[in-house]
Image (spheres, helix red, strand yellow):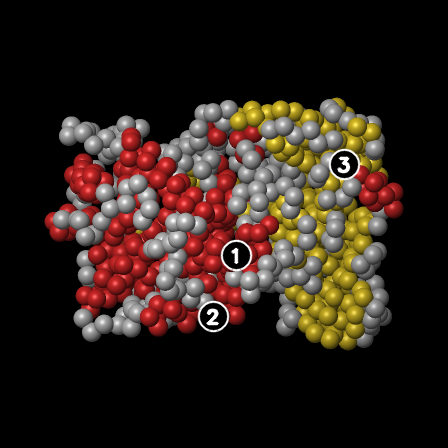
Amino acid sequence: MHMSRRTLLAATGATASAVLTAGPAGAARAGAREEDPINDFDRLLDRAQTLLTGGTFDLADPDFAAGVAALDTTAGALWDSLDRSAGRTALWSDLTPLTDPGNFGQSYTRLRTIAVAWATPGTAFFGQAETAQALLGALRFAFDTAYHPSAAETGNWWFWEIGAPRALMDCCVLLRAQLPAADLTDYLAVVDRFCPDADRRTNSPTLPETGANRTDKAVIVALRGLLGKDADKVASARDALSDVRDSGRNSLFRYTTSGDGFYEDGSFVQHSEVAYTGSYGTVLLGGAAWLLSLLAGSPWAVTDPEVSVMYEAVERSFVPVVFDGLMMDAVRGRAISRERAGDHRDGASAVAAILLLATGAPADLAERWRSLVKGWLTRNRTTPFTSLATLPQLALAKAVLAETSIPSAPRTTGSFVFADMDRVVHRRPGWAFTLSLSSKRISAYEAGNGENLHGWYTGDGMTYLYDGDDLGQYNDGFWPTVDPYRLPGTTVDTRPRADLGTGAGTSTYRPSNAVAGGAELDGRYGAAAMELIGAPGSSLRARKTWFLLDNTVVALGAGITSDDSRPVETVIENRNLGADGRNRLLVDGIPRHNGTSGVARWAHIEGVGGYVLPGGAALRTLREERTGTWRAIDTGADTGGSTDPVTRRYLTLWLDHGASPDGAGYAYVLLPGASAAATAVWSASRPVRITANDATAQAVEDRRTGLSAVHFWAAGTAAGITASGPATVLVRRRGARVSVAVADPGRTGTSVTIGLPFAVRRAAAADDTVRLTPGRRPVLTVAVGGSRGHTHRAELVQ
């Protein structure tokens, strides 16, 4: 078995290892610079090898023994199938012709796996002369046949400029004592041809590298500089992190306001418009941590003071989207279709990156991160980190688990609106709810190179419900078996869709709607909205809002209109029950299987939670067994899935709006983790009241917490609150204190006035963008222009 190119970068390249003997701070103390610069190169090459193999560890430890055994198994399978004959035309029979960039790219990554095993104490390959000679011959063969300076770059640029050179440089680091000088010269030359620096795309020299791609190339150039004993090359790799060449324009240590990179609100974007924290963002974080550790204490150590942006990203960007070690699929882009990735593997890569970064971070941050990681690792028994980690990653994780002074932090809670990438995350102690939105700024999906073939509706308001007792929901064969036309949270028509991304290159689809996003209040409550405009070929329109409360999510829809003569549905839930799940479904307390209810008021899925239909609705239910293959959703050259059938059971709940609805709507409430009895009580008592659900406003009032929340699609009044134009507003009264949050997720206005239905004497605190006119009918004037949909806040006194 081999891993996909992005997974491999995360697992054995960009986030593979940790400096086990000393992190950046420790290395700076332990590795005082020698007078002879050659010692600097050799010392850092030794460190690079430790980053790749893990250095020394206790083979008597069962976790390390299992890690060595796993590496042996993987490398052994590759070794057995490696063509070592004199007349070979390829290195592996399934990767032919070798001249295809996908084939030589994957060949190099397989050779790296064997090389890591050869350099790792305790494996069957460790130090074996036969293995070393076979690797040297294979590298030479790949160079002579396919990947050499005179080759023309064709096909997917990534293999030429990142995938192949990174794996080649890693192999050279590991085999450097055996590598003939002439071979090393040739391999450095091919890297100089296709990855001469980290600042530009080689096949498009005017295109600057950004985000994760820049990090990847910086690591390659640094290793090339060390191997060639070229101080200028190493310096250029360090400088690329800060983008010295272009005065910091594409620096990885800066917050961006458009395009690729980290945003101050915690968003991470790659490919200009894709929410990608969990894939490219993880690669960037891990690559930066790898290079910081590699160069620490050397003449090329990273000294940019803005490196703090990378530290801040851990808690701003990553912690909210990691649930017990799983990376939320809403921020993994097209990687959701990769069989050998999965939320558990991308989550493990993020955990490894954070642990590695902690080795050189300020002590207070490192302590906090290790506590968070310890909580993730101890709670995740479904896919333990120890079963996913490489040996270097394992060493850092075990050190955290063994340290009694490091407490296990509880699950992160709060509401997080990532306005700059159209994502919303709401977290409570036992569960998390994630919204995947899209707009004319952020794509609904990315597909291409055969990946994410059925991602049509993943950005149309898809909702993810994470349960602390069911960490396998989206990892256990979900994507190849779920009905892609019935993703939870979405409102869709039922037209057949053609596969996406079957051609070369990647592409995205951005709908034309402006509204996508919302506001959060007190870091605890949230409201989010999306104007749904159907993709080309569909006239579907809808206005959708979600209110995120203490133990409740209220979902409202209005203005659902279509003239295509096709049925339109809103999907409440599509729950993966696993291979053998028999979770009981109750509708108004009566067991149900398939069909349409009369006027249902509530439903309950055993082990998941409750679903309330305020006012009642005709609820459609379906219990089915679905079979699919990973190959059906991903045919990528190095990410393509298997054709083995996967079967899972599902429970689907949805509302049917009929063919060509005109102004239809819906309302449903999620009660994650609630019992059937609690769901019935909630349905009867309705502690949260829906006060508006139309094309002007959608609003709720939570009497228990004193919260009123409204999304205004236009000027109007709802829940006693008035707005002069489109806005998301949350107001909470606690005694004489009033908290207010306002956002303009459509980014269409310059100023909005919000009127409150009770007297206010003064503002105790307010953002500079908020001005209060106190009185019996107070008015807040909020300068929303230029704020990119972010929340504006005020604390008022009655």
Q: Quadrant for residue 97, please give it.
A: top left
- Across and down, in percent, residue 136 comes to 19, 42
Residue drawn at x 19%, y 52% as measured from the top left? 177
Residue type highlighted by circle 3: His
Residue 263 visible, this angle: no
- Please tell me the numbered disc located at residue 604: 3
Q: Nearer the viewer, residue 275 or 183?
A: 183
Vertical side of 370 occupied by 498: above or below: above
Figure label count: 3
- Across and down, in percent, residue 227 comes to 21, 56
Q: Earlier in the sequence, mark 2 or mark 1?
A: 2
258 relative to 439 in the view: left or right: left
Residue type highlighted by circle 2: Pro
The residue where tag 2 is placed is 362
Picture quarter with the C terminus: bottom right
- Please tell me the numbered disc located at residue 401: 1
